[in-house]
Amino acid sequence: MEMSRPLDTLNQARNKRVIAELKNGKQFVGVLKAFDIHINTVLDDAEEMVDGESKRKLGTVFLRGDTIILITLAD
Amino acid sequence: MEMSRPLDTLNQARNKRVIAELKNGKQFVGVLKAFDIHINTVLDDAEEMVDGESKRKLGTVFLRGDTIILITLAD
Amino acid sequence: MEMSRPLDTLNQARNKRVIAELKNGKQFVGVLKAFDIHINTVLDDAEEMVDGESKRKLGTVFLRGDTIILITLAD
Amino acid sequence: MEMSRPLDTLNQARNKRVIAELKNGKQFVGVLKAFDIHINTVLDDAEEMVDGESKRKLGTVFLRGDTIILITLAD
Amino acid sequence: MEMSRPLDTLNQARNKRVIAELKNGKQFVGVLKAFDIHINTVLDDAEEMVDGESKRKLGTVFLRGDTIILITLAD
Amino acid sequence: MEMSRPLDTLNQARNKRVIAELKNGKQFVGVLKAFDIHINTVLDDAEEMVDGESKRKLGTVFLRGDTIILITLAD
Amino acid sequence: MEMSRPLDTLNQARNKRVIAELKNGKQFVGVLKAFDIHINTVLDDAEEMVDGESKRKLGTVFLRGDTIILITLAD
C-alpha cells in the first residue's frame, strides 16, 4: 500500500473546478478550496446544478463530508 | 495539504448571516455564532425558511452537526 | 476559533424551557436539565408536541443525542 | 457544565418501569435493569406496546442503544 | 453505575435459544454462541422466522451488530 | 465473557462457501477468503443470487463491512 | 486470523479496471488508483454505468468510502 492515497487526488484538484455529488442527489460545482480527512469540503464560486443547469449561485459553500458521494473535476 | 482547512472557512463566517441546510430538507438562516469539529452549529436570530420565506423565528438555535448538509453565506 | 462553542449555548439554556426536534419529526418541549457531548439530553416536565399542541406529558425524558436535529429556547 | 449528566437520569430510573421508544416506532415497557454509554439497555418484564396495549411479553430484553430514541418513566 | 451492564445480560443468555430482531424487520431464532461489544452476534441452529413460522434454516449465522435491534430469550 | 467471539466463527468459515446478505437486500455467495474487524469481506468465485438463482458471476468481490447484515455457510 | 486481509485484495486490484457499486445503486467502472482504510477510493478513466452502458465519462473520480457497497474486477 505504498502507492498514492485518495486524499492526494483531492489535493491535486485544489483550485480547480470540481463537481461534488451529495447523498440527497444534489450536485454542486465550484473551485475546490479546502477539504479534510472527513471530506468536509469548501467550494468557491459554487453553484447548485440541476440537470446540467445552474439552479442557484452560492459563492463559498461548506459541505459536510458525510453527505458527499463523489468529487470529480468539472473540466 | 498545507492549504486552508474547511473549518477555517466556517470561522471566517462567524458573526455573519449564513444559511444552513439540513438532511431533512429544512433550511435555517441566522448569524453563525459557534461551531465545533462535529459541525454542531449555533445560529443567532435564526429563522426557518421555506421557499425563501420565513416560516418561523427561532432566536438562538443549536443544530446537531450530523444533520447539516451545507453552510453558506446568506448575504 | 477562540470564540464560543456550541455546547456553551446549550449550557446557557439549562433550567430553561427548550424545544428539541428529532429526526423522526417529533418535537419535545421541556426544561433542559442535562446534556453531554453526544447531545444526549434530559428534559424535565416534558411534553410531546404536535402542531403546537401537547400530545402527551412525559415528565422527565432522556433523548438519545443522535436522534436530535435542533434545540432552541421555547421562548 | 458542572451539572448533572444525562446518564445520571437513567441511573435514577434503574429498577423502575420505563418506556423505551425505538427508531422503528416500536415501544417497549419494562423495568430498567442496565444500560451503558452507548445506551444499550436491558429491560426486565418487558412488553412491546402498540397503541397503549401490550402486543407481546418478552421477559428480559436487550435493546441495542443506537435504536433508541427516548427513555422515560412509565409511572 | 455500579450495577449490572447490558452485556452481562447477553452473557447470561449464552447457549440459550434467543430471538434477534434486525432493523430490516427480519427475526432470527437460534442458540446464542458469541457476541462482542459491537453486538456482532453468532447464533447456532438458527432459523429465520416470519410470523412465528420458520422460513429457512441457516445453521450457524453471524449477524453484524449494527443491524440488530433487540435480543431476547426465545424460551 | 471468556467464551468464543463472533469473529472466531467467521474465521472457521474461511475457504468455505458462504452467503453474505446486504442491507440493500442483495445476496452474494462465494468462498470466504478474508475479513477484518469492520466485517469488510472478500469472497472468491462470488455470484450475486436472486431468489436462489445466480444473477451474475463476479469472481473475487470486496464487500464493505457496513453493508453486511449476515454471513452464514452456503451449506 | 493469520490469513489475508480484505484490503490486500483491493491492493492487488490496483491499476486494474474495477466496478464500484454504491449505496444509491450507481455503478462506476474505472482503473483503481488509490484507496484507504475508510475505502475512500479513486478511479481513473471512470465511467458511470447504467444497465451495462456508459452513462457519462468522469475521468478521475474520488468516491467517499461509506457510499461503497462492493468493489470487484471489471473483468
Image (cartoon, coloured by chain):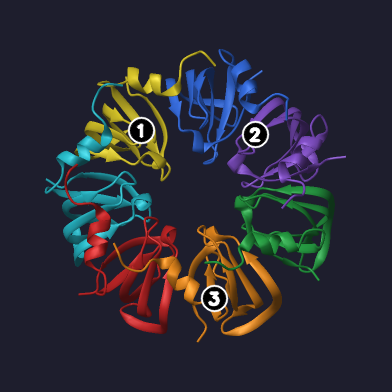
Chain colours: A green, B purple, C blue, D yellow, E cyan, F red, G orange
Instruction: Give left or right: position of G15 versus B33.
Output: left
Secondary element under disc 2, as helix, strand or loop, is loop
Residue situated in front as seen by the camera: D13 or A29: A29
Can residue G40 be seen here? The reply is yes
Same chain for the residues at labels 2 and 1, yes or no? Answer: no
Crowdedness of circle 1 by 10 Å Cα count: few (<14), some, many (20+)? many
Instruction: Give left or right: position of G49 versus D40.
Output: right
Q: Nearer the viewer, mark 3 or mark 1?
A: 3
Identify the residue position indicated by label 2 in the image: B36
Secondary element under disc 1, as helix, strand or loop, is strand
Identify the residue position indicated by label 1 in the image: D20
Crowdedness of circle 2 by 10 Å Cα count: few (<14), some, many (20+)? some
Q: Chain of mark 1?
A: D
In x, y percent, where is residue G50? 60, 79
In x, y percent, where is residue C70? 61, 32
The image's mark for residue G14 is 3
Can residue G71 be seen here? The reply is no
Q: Nearer the viewer, mark 2 or mark 3?
A: 3
Q: Residue type at mark 3: give it.
A: Arg
Residue situated in front as seen by the camera: F28 or G9: G9
Crowdedness of circle 3 by 10 Å Cα count: few (<14), some, many (20+)? some
